[in-house]
Image (cartoon, rainbow, N blue to C red):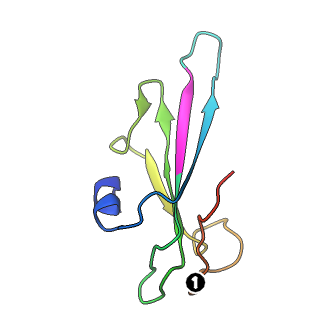
Amino acid sequence: MNLASFIFNNSCFIWSLTVRGNSYSIAAKAKIDLAIGVRTEDLGSVINVGGVQVIYGSSNGLSATLAHADQFWTQDSTNIDNQAEQSDFFGFGLA
């Protein structure tokens, strides 16, 4: 799912956000990543499992169009503990 369709299909788009900055060298521009919690995301027929949209930054800023620039995570995603269940509201709070 790309960011534009994600925004269009989610009436409760931004529930929580977190920003992470990183600088890889003194000469490099800071790279900022953005995580957006979408607690009411449905996964198939399972409602309100929740999810987190992650948009990775580059030296040119945030972009959802570059290769591997954004990801959408649920509790069914690889390397995320537990499993997606109804009313989990994953993404409710981000730190």
Closest to the observer: 40 or 28? 40
Closest to the observer: 68 or 7? 7
Position of residue 88 measured from the top left corner of the image (x, y, whole percent): 61, 79
Asked where in the image residue 45 lies, by quadrant, the reply is bottom left
Q: Is residue 6 left or right of residue 48?
A: left
As for residue 31 lying within the magenta part, the answer is yes
Position of residue 14 measured from the top left corner of the image (x, y, whole percent): 46, 57
Query: Which residue is at the far bottom?
Result: 45
Q: Which quadrant is the N terminus positioned in? A: bottom left
Asked where in the image residue 25 lies, by quadrant, the reply is top right
In magenta, the rendered stretch is 30-35
Residue at 67% x, 65% y is 79
Q: Which residue is mark 1?
A: 87
Residue at 41% x, 25% y is 60
- The prevailing secondary structure element of the residues shown in magenta is strand
Position of residue 91 measured from the top left corner of the image (x, y, whole percent): 59, 64
Closest to the observer: 62 or 36? 36
Q: Is residue 3 above or below residue 57?
A: below
* Label 1 environment density (alpha carbons within 10 Å; few <14, some 14–19, many ≥20): some
Residue at 52% x, 44% y is 34
Q: Is residue 42 above or below residue 2?
A: below
User: SS class of the residue under badge 1?
Assistant: loop
Q: How many marks?
A: 1
Residue at 43% x, 44% y is 69
The amino acid type found where label 1 is placed reads Ser
As for residue 56 lying within the magenta part, the answer is no
Position of residue 70 measured from the top left corner of the image (x, y, whole percent): 44, 50
Q: Is residue 89 left or right of residue 2?
A: right
